[in-house]
Image: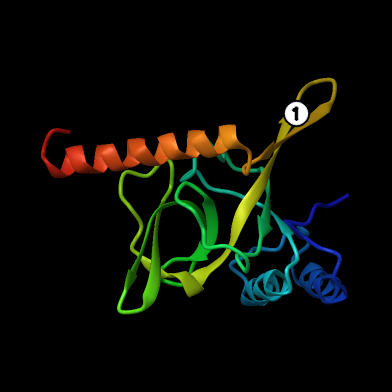
Amino acid sequence: MKRIALTCSSLCWQTLVDQKRSQNDSGVISIRDQGALDLISFLLDQGRDIHIRVSGESMRPTLLGGETVQIASLKTLRPGVGELLLLYDQQGNPLIHRLVRRYSCQGIFYVQTQGDACLAFDAPVPLRQVLGRVTHILYHFKSSSSDLSRVTDLRTPTVRLKSYFIVARQLAFFFLRRAGRV
């Protein structure tokens, strides 16, 4: 059975999957595909949660690649420092990075993110470019006898505290590097 990178219970999503399967036999839909991004935005605007399988190494050790993350809408609350966000960067590419700073300039709210494994902050982007927040991570472990999974709820106080420490470490490293001490 082939896995789909993005899952939801929507009829329009099934239509998109069927169209993509005819073009790409792997069964995995890239979220860089504009149709998939439009669908993600639509579902999050409707208040639905979505699941995305992640790839890449910029969020190590939090996300190693291959995990499934649950994304929720930002409709109710502004994102908090330390949260993982799904957003468009300045070039319009979707990514999941940690929020390290938010601010307002001339009435427009901006967010600045950074990957846990990255040395530099991402360029600030307007809050409207944030699609949603990561609420859960499903880790998949393969062993010789069975497949195991573990779910981490990113909203628990312990995980939130760990996120603050990660942001504090990133900011301290930034200021030390700026002062020429690293």
Q: Please name whichever residue, 105 or 50, is drawn nearer the observer in this view of the structure.
A: 105
Q: Please name whichever residue, 4 or 129, is drawn nearer the observer in this view of the structure.
A: 129
Quadrant of res 13: bottom right
Which residue is at a point 31% across and 44% down the rendered structure image? 119
- Residue 91 x %, y %: 41, 71
The residue type indicated by label 1 comes to: Lys
What residue does disc 1 label? 142
- Residue 81 x %, y %: 45, 50
Quadrant of res 126: bottom left
- Residue 138 x %, y %: 71, 41
Where disc 1 sits, the SS reads strand
The C terminus appears in which quarter of the rendering?
A: top left
Q: Specify whether residue 94 is in view.
A: no
In the rendered image of this protein, does residue 3 appear above or below residue 93? above
Q: Is residue 40 left or right of residue 104?
A: right
Q: How is the image coloured?
A: rainbow
Q: Please name whichever residue, 139 or 132, is drawn nearer the observer in this view of the structure.
A: 132
In the rendered image of this protein, does residue 50 appear above or below residue 43? above
- Residue 36 x %, y %: 68, 71
Which residue is at a point 65% across and 63% down the rendered structure image? 30
Which residue is at a point 76% across and 71% down the rendered structure image? 20
Which residue is at a point 69% across and 76% down the rendered structure image? 42
Q: Residue furthest left?
A: 180
Q: Residue furthest top?
A: 145
In the rendered image of this protein, does residue 160 appear above or below residue 143? below
Q: Is residue 36 left or right of residue 165?
A: right
Q: Specify whether residue 57 is in view.
A: yes
Q: Is residue 113 left or right of residue 74?
A: left
State the count of labels: 1
Label 1, residues with CA under 10 Å away: few <14, some 14-19, many ≥20: few
Q: Please name whichever residue, 83 or 119, is drawn nearer the observer in this view of the structure.
A: 83
